[in-house]
Amino acid sequence: MRSRFSAFAVGDAAYLRETWDPATRPRRVDVDPATRWTHLEVLDRTGGGLLESTGTVRFRAHHDGGVVAEDSRFRRAGGRWLYVGPA
């Protein structure tokens, strides 16, 4: 989750696409260069441990125009965590 927030903050759409589950990934990932992401609050998580293959993260991502809040689902594939979508 933190690495994806950082990718939004620096405008790295390629990283966001690479870390998105292919089953739910959009054809294109656009990042608005005018949006200034300021900080991330991780509020809760479930799963996601060393021996687990799924997990969720509840977060608030703050930017200069407001806040994005979501409970996100992730799954591990090939040793890497992939964003699946909202929980």
Image: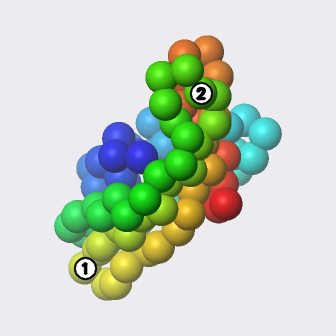
| Residue at (67% x, 60% y) in the render | 87
Q: Is residue 55 shown left or right of residue 58?
A: right
Q: Is residue 59 shown left or right of residue 38?
A: right
x and y, in percent, of residue 2 in the image: 34, 46
Residue 64's disc number: 1
x and y, in percent, of residue 24 in the image: 75, 47
Front residue of 1/36: it is: 1
| Residue at (53% x, 48% y) in the render | 46
Q: Can residue 14 be seen in this view?
A: no
In the displayed orientation, state which residue is furthest to the right.
Answer: 23
Judge depth for marks 1 and 2 and give the one in front: 2
| Residue at (21% x, 67% y) in the render | 38
Determine whether label 1 and label 2 are within 8 Å by CB.
Answer: no
> How dense is the environment of label 2, judged by Cα within 10 Å: few (below 14), some, or many (20 and up)?
few
The amino acid pointed to by label 1 is Asp
x and y, in percent, of residue 7 in the image: 35, 46
Q: Is mark 1 on a helix, strand or loop?
A: loop
| Residue at (72% x, 35% y) in the render | 22
> How dense is the environment of label 1, judged by Cα within 10 Å: few (below 14), some, or many (20 and up)?
few
x and y, in percent, of residue 10 in the image: 27, 50
Residue 32's disc number: none
Q: Can residue 5 be seen in this view?
A: yes
Number of numbered discs on residues: 2
**Distance from Cα at disc 1 to Cα at disc 2:** 35 Å
Considering only vertical position in the picture, is 2 above or below 62?
Answer: above
Q: Identify the image quadrant of residue 86.
A: bottom right
Q: Mark 2 points at which residue?
A: 52
Mark 1 vs mark 2: which is more N-terminal? 2
In the displayed orientation, state which residue is furthest to the bottom.
Answer: 65
Q: What element carries label 2?
A: loop
Q: How is the image coloured?
A: rainbow
The amino acid pointed to by label 2 is Glu
